[in-house]
């Protein structure tokens, strides 16, 4: 890890411990609780391409249940990352899109996704070696 990145992370953790003695109030934990789940990342990534209606988004992601998609969209909306628009049609149609805050998350998320693609072979190899040794 570059020295500057390690120093920045250490400084953030010190600040967090000093300013947020209650672990649940830590901004990093708070944000990661919402954004680190695979469904949140997949939904946000899909919405980065274009707005989706619920059924389209479910088909785009594929293996998510209707209940999990509904709950995750509500959580993302509550956190201000996703906007929900209801159109006055019969029946009403609903569209989901990234909010400006959600759009701002795409830069760090793209970095994480790039890292995952670059390092997946090494991770797969490490997992196989670990399994053999176990």
Image: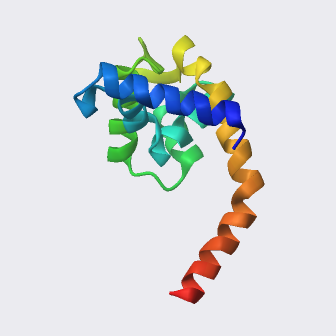
Q: Relative to the observer, which residue lies in front, 130 or 71?
A: 130
Q: Quadrant of the N terminus?
A: top right
79 relative to 46 in the view: left or right: left
Number of numbered discs present? 0
**In terms of depth relative to the viewer, which is nearer, 37 or 82?**
37
Q: In which quarter of the image is residue 121?
A: bottom right
**Residue 28 appears at what percent x and percent y?**
42, 30
The way the protein has been coloured in the rendering is rainbow
In screen coordinates, is 68 left or right of 54? left
Q: In which quarter of the image is residue 97?
A: top right
Single out the residue that lies furthest toward the left: 22
Q: Which of 87 and 24 is in front in this view?
A: 24
**Residue in the image at 60% along x and 31% along y:** 7
Query: Residue sitting at 60 percent across and 19 percent down?
Result: 103
Rendered view: 60 above or below 105: below
Residue at position x 65%, y 33% from top? 5
Q: Where is residue 34 in the image (x, y as percent from the top left)?
A: 39, 34
Residue 61 placement (x, y as % from top left): 55, 47
Give the image location of residue 118, x and y in percent: 77, 53
Please report the residue visible at 22 percent of the width from the left and 29 percent of the height from the top.
Answer: 22
Residue 79 shows in this picture: yes
Q: In this view, does 101 lie above or below 124?
A: above
């Amino acid at each position: 890890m570059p020295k500057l990145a390690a120093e920045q992370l250490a400084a953030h953790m010190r600040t967090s411990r000093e300013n947020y003695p209650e672990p649940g109030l830590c901004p990093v934990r708070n944000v990661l609780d919402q954004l680190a789940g695979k469904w949140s990342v997949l939904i946000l990534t899909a919405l980065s391409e274009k707005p989706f209606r619920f059924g389209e988004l479910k088909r785009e992601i594929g293996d998510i249940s209707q209940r999990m998609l509904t709950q995750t969209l509500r959580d993302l909306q509550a956190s201000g990352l996703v906007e929900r628009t209801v159109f006055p049609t019969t029946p009403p149609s609903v569209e989901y899109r990234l909010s400006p805050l959600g759009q701002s998350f795409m830069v760090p998320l793209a970095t994480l996704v790039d890292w995952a693609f670059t390092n997946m072979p090494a991770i797969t190899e490490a997992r196989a070696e670990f399994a053999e040794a176990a």
